[in-house]
Amino acid sequence: MSIAPAPLPRFSPKVRAGCAFSVPVELHLSSRLTLSGVVVAILIVLCAATSAQDIDWKKGKLGHLIRLIGTYDNDALLGDPQVKQALAQVVGKDVRLLKENLAVRGPIDFIDGDLVLTGLAPHMGGVEEATLWVKVYDGSVRAVIMHEGKVTI
């Protein structure tokens, strides 16, 4: 014996969905969910999200630092006057410790609109580490420092 789910309310209006990468599609809302309805619902969500893709995350207050992506020039990033000021507000007196914990590092990365530094003190992995995220768009800074095995955000 099977129990049928309660019917969903019927909606009579047609909903039009479309965006830059799809052909307009008509969706009739009904009590039955079909695979094509799921696909159309996903397309509607993706269409709403396309506006975020139109933003150039490499432009903004610190756009002049984009040239550092893929380089090892931490000094240029940390020495930028706007970054120095934001870093002093966020990290305060621990700027020296942050720099020491970024001594062994990979290249400057670009993730979700941020220039990202990740590193550790020489021969101190798991004890002395740091990461710095610098938002290109507005110049904001986030830092995480692991000192003596304890993490400070």
Image (spheres, helix red, strand yellow):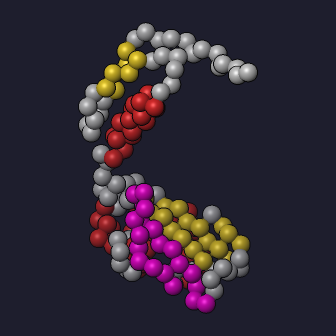
117 within the magenta span: yes
Question: In front here: 56 or 14?
Answer: 14
- Where is residue 128? Give x, y as percent: 64, 80
Name the side, left or right, on which 76 lies relative to 34.
Answer: left
Q: Which residues are magenta?
A: 104-123
The answer to which of 139 and 101 lies nearer the viewer is: 101
Q: Residue at x 55, y 66 (%)?
A: 143
Q: Residue furthest top?
A: 12
The quadrant the N terminus occupies is top right
Q: Label the magenta part by its dominant secondary structure.
A: strand
Residue 48 found in image quarter:
top left
Residue 144 appears in the picture as rendered? yes
**Image point 59% across, 67% down: which residue?**
144
Up-down: is 128 above or below 84?
A: below
Q: Is residue 144 above or below residue 11?
A: below
Which residue corresponds to the image point at 30% horizontal and 30% vertical from the top-left?
A: 18
Does 149 appear above or below 12?
Answer: below
